[in-house]
Amino acid sequence: MSTDTLPRGPRAVLMGLPAVCAVLVIAASRQAWRRVGAVSASGSQLTGGLVDGLGMLGLAGCALLLVTATTGRRLVGILLVLVGVATVVGIGLDSQFSAAEWARHGVATGSGSASPLLAAGWLAVVAAAVMALDGLALAVWAARWPARASRFSRTHDLRPISAEDDPRQVWAAMDRGEDPTAHDPPATSEGRGSN
């Protein structure tokens, strides 16, 4: 392993941490974020489902990390930064649950928006901020990840496998995607076809 390659442990953290943060954001958005007396509003209600959608987008970005190369990882990192920042801004605004909706639940106008953010809301803020920082780290360190295995790509230099080859080599060739039955037709068949 070269010295400029990111070790496996930090790579696992960079890939797993945003997924955990996205799940935390989604779970926290379903909890009460603001409460006035006995009336509470969840993060989904306060943001009109925006935080849920951003959490799902972050989770989808994390899934892309499994199949992308360096440029794709950089783009996913930038996506996670944008998702994290947008989530924090969405939580800060949380204006979808209007004064009329608070009033419909018996809460005086202005009391709902003035109530403090509860623990679930702060958890979502922290998770979104960590997701944004992790996305930034992904974008910066994407080039230090080793290249994905090209086992299933068609860029191998395929050569026909002959009967004289070592059986272990034949199995290794099949693992690389080579077809042991793909041979040039024998010379005798060409001779018969020309008569």
Image (cartoon, rainbow, N blue to C red):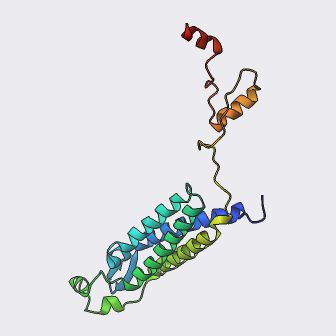
Which one is in front, 131 or 105? Answer: 131
Q: Quadrant of the N terminus?
A: bottom right
Indicate the position of residue 147 as horizontal and vertical percent values. Answer: 66, 56
Q: Is residue 186 above or below residue 137?
A: above
Q: Is residue 157 left or right of residue 45?
A: right
* 66 sits to left or right of 42: right
Q: Which residue shows up at 57% across the image and 76% down it?
A: 133
Estimate the x, y position of residue 125 in percent, counting from the top left.
48, 80
Location of the C terminus by quadrant is: top right
Residue 71 visible from this viewpoint: yes
Quarter of the rendering containing residue 5: bottom right
Instruction: Specify whether 38 is left or right of 161.
Output: left
Q: Is residue 110 left or right of residue 124?
A: left
Instruction: Tell me the residue at 78%/61% (across/down).
Output: 2
> Foreground: 8 or 75?
75
Identify the residue at the far front of this view: 195
Does residue 119 lie above or below 21 as drawn?
below
Query: Which residue is located at x 32 percent, y 88 percent?
Result: 112
* Residue 123 drawn at (x, y percent): 49, 78
